[in-house]
Amino acid sequence: MKKDQFIVICAECPEDAKKLLPTAKFFAEKLRKGMILLSCAPGAEAWIEQFDIPFMALKGDWKTAIDALPTAMNAVLAITLAAPQAPRHNISHPRTLLKYFRDCKVAYLVLPSQLSISKYQFSITALTIDHQRESKEKLIWASYMARFFGSAIHVMHRNYRDAAFKMRWKNNMRYLDKIFSSLNLTYETEIIEGGSEFGNPDLLAIKQLSTLNSQPSILFISLVPDRRDRDLGDLFTKPAELRLIKNGAHLPILFLNQRDDLYVLCD
């Protein structure tokens, strides 16, 4: 069957490609999409053919290639590796990765370089719902994980004391209920302990997930805020998405950039 949408594997070197391929093949199989191996690294043409899947070895820069994923490659998902020890110019370096993907219009799955298993099954998909404007795409991706992967959906939230925050959070939960009930999907909830109601709930949620005695295969979905919403204080702190990538349990993160247009899968 001809595939018209693709999972794009973004790899700097053959070693990274080998780590990413099992999970990419898993996603391609479950979502019934094709695969493309992409590299913009110097000399990529010397190794990229060995993996026997469609490939692109581009001479341009990573940022331009990633910005063109939905239009030039019909991508619905990009998969890449995060390696804190990688050289700063390498796409696997967390700060460089986030710089290249900051305008990405498709979801991008970031796998840790410390792969504890060869292929993630994602038996649990976790995400937070808070009082702020939520992305429809975030909930749609959670529904994909439930429908196509059989993943248990784990919704984490604060126990709000502020009446206005609580009302907005309830509105977001009603929207979640609307989407999931229309697809006959279920989810479970967990309260996020500690922290300020004004803080980023993702950071506390992933820390809470990291304390599980039994570590199942967990995927965490995170919405990256629009850069226009950042204030002066954000210039002096590490971005939340960078701290998520470096989470202590080395959990994979599915990032969605907050924006007005959506690129989602076709069913």
Image: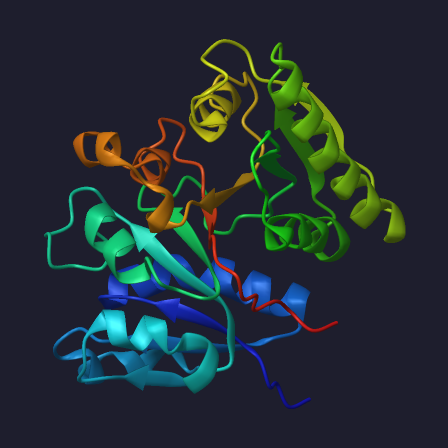
Give the left or right position of residue 183, taking residue 225 as reference: right
The foreground one among 164 and 75 is: 164
Give the left or right position of residue 78, taking residue 66 as reference: right
84 in relation to 196, above or below? below
Q: Total marks drawn?
A: 0
10 in relation to 118, above or below? below
Q: Residue at x 61, y 75 (%)?
A: 33
The foreground one among 83 and 208 is: 208
Which residue, as the protein is rendered here, is positioned at the far bottom? 2
Q: Quadrant of residue 64?
A: bottom left
Q: Quadrant of residue 21?
A: bottom left
Q: Quadrant of the C terminus?
A: bottom right
Q: Residue at x 50, y 58 (%)?
A: 23
Q: Residue at x 28, y 36 (%)?
A: 231
Q: Quadrant of the N terminus?
A: bottom right
| Horizontal and vertical percent position of residue 144 | 69, 56
